[in-house]
Image (spheres, rainbow, N blue to C red):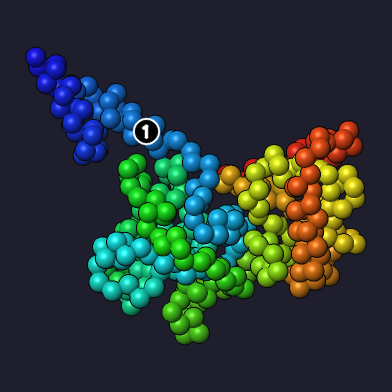
Amino acid sequence: MAKKAAKKSAQSTTATGTVPVVGAREACPCGSGRRYKACHGRQAAHAEQELVQRPFEGLPGEADWVALRELVPAATAPLALTAAAAAGAAGEVPSVTLATVLPLAWPALRRPDGSILLGLQTQSSSGDLSRDLADALTQALTIEPGTPVPTRRAPADGPRLQDLLDLDAPFAPTVHTGFEFWLEDAESASGEVAASLERANASAIPTEKLSGVDSAYWCGTPDKNHLRWVMTVPEEQLLDALARLAAAGNASLGEGTKLVGSFRAHGLTVPVWDLPVEMSAADCEKPAATFAERLAGALAEEAPLSAEERRARANLVSRQVTLN
């Protein structure tokens, strides 16, 4: 009878999701009679290790979320909360802004005026980056203004960004040349704050977002420039299309440019081109738009790849780099 009662208690507690976290060797609060690490602790550990391959899927601008997470040094984007999320805030929240990175890699910051900066380039502890970011945002909504959000492990059953953000609001990132957006009045910065800002700005690779195509980012380096284009086309289909174009000699963006490979990042594929050092972001606009048309045509083809196209595909696959 006691075992049956314990089992019933564990089931009812699990159903309501109210099992608290305790020490690994302590008795599990669910009443099973087992140690926490062998009962609900094991379930929690499994949930934390489970990797969500596309954490930004379902959010407007998924490809730009990936770009700001992995490729862009300094950028911001306004975020719109759901009515329920806004209602749960402590006090007025004038605005919520996504930032690529915050000082000291803070997950989030609530400024003195109540506005919120949410850091994107932070470490994921749960295996679901969307859940980690939502946890930071939830904390920022309830802490006192003028306070950074500390790093912590997100609860396995906590909300995701898809639960907190208005999915009908557009995602419109702005790329910056530096990190002045950290401060409400960057011009008045002095001392260590100014020095820290200067160091951060010096480390940022010049980056610009193309306006004529979606989610393509130019960046400049001393030796050569690059175009990194985040695409939502399924990887296998995209690689086939890129292989068709490469085999036909149509995969470049013009003279002196070359498709050199691709990144994998958060479930999306990011083709990368080498560009001449004199080729600016503005110079990429027309070639990128023309390439987008060629790519659409290649994606529509259904015939099996030829031997030459298969070789081109194998070459592309051999030069893929996984970022996460």
Q: Nearer the viewer, residue 178 or 162?
A: 162
Q: Amino acid at mark 1?
A: Ala
Question: What residue occupies the far bottom of the structure in this picture?
Answer: 188
Residue 182 is situated, as x and y percent measured from the top left of the image, at 47, 72
Residue 209 is situated, as x and y percent measured from the top left of the image, at 66, 68
Q: Is residue 274 left or right of residue 127?
A: right
Q: Nearer the viewer, residue 1 or 47?
A: 1
Q: Nearer the viewer, residue 201 or 239?
A: 239
Residue 14 is situated, as x and y percent measured from the top left of the image, at 23, 33
Q: Classify 10 Å Cα crowding around label 1: few (below 14), some (14-19), many (20 and above).
A: few
In the rendered image, the quadrant that contains the C terminus is top right
Q: For residue 319, say whether it is visible.
A: no
Residue in the image at 35% along x and 68% along y = 110
The residue tagged with tag 1: helix, strand or loop?
helix
238 over 116 or under it: above or below: above
164 over 320 or under it: above or below: below
Q: For residue 23, say whether it is visible.
A: yes
288 over 27 or under it: above or below: below
Q: Is residue 74 left or right of residue 186?
A: right
58 over 93 or under it: above or below: above
Q: On the image, numbered disc 1 is attached to which residue?
A: 45
Quadrant of residue 1 within the rendered picture? top left
Residue 22 is situated, as x and y percent measured from the top left of the image, at 23, 35
Question: What residue occupies the far top of the structure in this picture?
Answer: 1
Residue in the image at 83% along x and 60% along y = 253
Residue in the image at 41% along x and 62% along y = 166
Please count the marks in the image.
1
